[in-house]
Image (cartoon, rainbow, N blue to C red):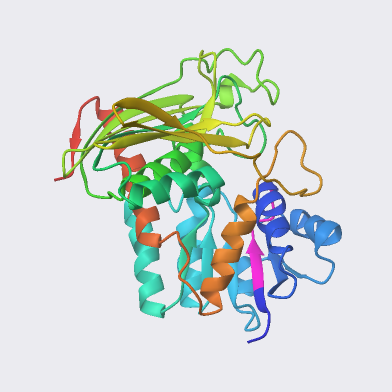
Amino acid sequence: MGKLRIGIIGCGSIARVKHVRALLQFPDRCEITALADMQPAAAYSLREDLLPGAKVYEDFEELLNDPSVDAVHICTPNHSHCEIAVKALNAGKHVMCEKPMAESYADACRMVEAAKKNQRKLTVGYQNRFRDDSQAVHAAARAGDLGEIYYAKAHATRRKKVPTWGRFLSMEAQGGGPLIDIGTHAIDLALWFMDNYEIASVTAAAFKGLVDDPAGNVWGPWDPAKFEVEDSAFGFIRMKNGALLSVEASWALNIPDAREACVTVCGTKGGAQQLQGDYGPGSYRWKLVKAEYDRLVTVTPDGPEKFIPMGDLTDEVLSLAPVREMDSWLTDLEGGRPHAVRAEQAAAVVRVIETMYESARQGRTVRLD
């Protein structure tokens, strides 16, 4: 088959830094041929900087009507994911949607059903599964080295790193704050490691503890009057088999150490822990703990983490994970091995997040069983 032709809908930072730069690593397998954004200047700027051959559409539906486009990547604000994805799938396009899949579980299910009805492929951008440490922990869990996993903790905490650009602080655009923004990655990893998506009940609370104190924010001060979402959220998810998942998500929390997109898993034979790495934001390491020969043992990998240069990144170190993610996605579209992130799994993550927000609003446990 020839090159896959890909369209990008939403041409902001996540499209530029992750999707486009990762896809450009595969010039013999794919080509980004079309761009669309509700602010056309963003699409024209992306074309000028990185994609001189791409066509710019000022309406995403015009892009979807382009018969030459095989797949679209949706990189728009959260509230628009479902509408665009369903229209894209109905137009016969394969879809990679940025996280979170949708703002509601009902919308996530609509997306899954549209993919099935149109026999198109649908996935969600959970690149953290493709990190070295995530692959190692997942392999240990699947090999039985951890035994039965009965407890996990999803870590998505920042000390004071509130995104002050775009529409991150808008409830209408995003549907929430750090829980739906960065918590989604940690929850996805935890459920994937546990291989457990059957949720029984959720107890959660959300806070605006530091909303009125923007001093010291890594990305500059925010306007408290425009901070419509939570700055932190915490919850306990009980699974139908009795296992427990604890979730912590924050953009701003008075803690000494941040820990983002990391998971701790505890099983009957051993446990594993993901930690921030030694190369700054975006780098990770891992440990496996167990008892062996009547001694407690901690296993850590040898060798440095692997990185590749990705251009004009500023304070972020980008690992191979997004490139591996796109490699897996392209392989699936080419008829090879199915992509690791299934839409049904991403929908379960949305259900956890939605129910955490519901529990926080109601101030009580919400039961799903």
The image shows residue 306 at horizontal and vertical percentages of 67, 45
Q: In the image as oriented, which residue stretches furthest toward the front?
A: 293
> Could you tell whether 351 is left or right of 134 in the image?
left
> Could you tell whether 158 is left or right of 183 in the image?
right
Depth order, front residue of 360/291: 291
Depth order, front residue of 206/190: 190
Q: Which residues are magenta?
A: 6-12
Instruction: Name which quarter of the figure residue 303 lies in.
Output: top right
Q: Is residue 166 above or below residue 297?
A: below
Q: Is residue 98 magenta?
A: no
The image shows residue 346 at horizontal and vertical percentages of 40, 54
Q: Residue at x 80, y 64 (%)?
A: 51
Q: Residue at x 68, y 44 (%)?
A: 318
Q: Residue at x 69, y 55 (%)?
A: 11
- For the C terminus, the quadrant is top left
Q: Is residue 51 above or below residue 360?
A: below
> Could you tell whether 119 is left or right of 65 in the image?
left
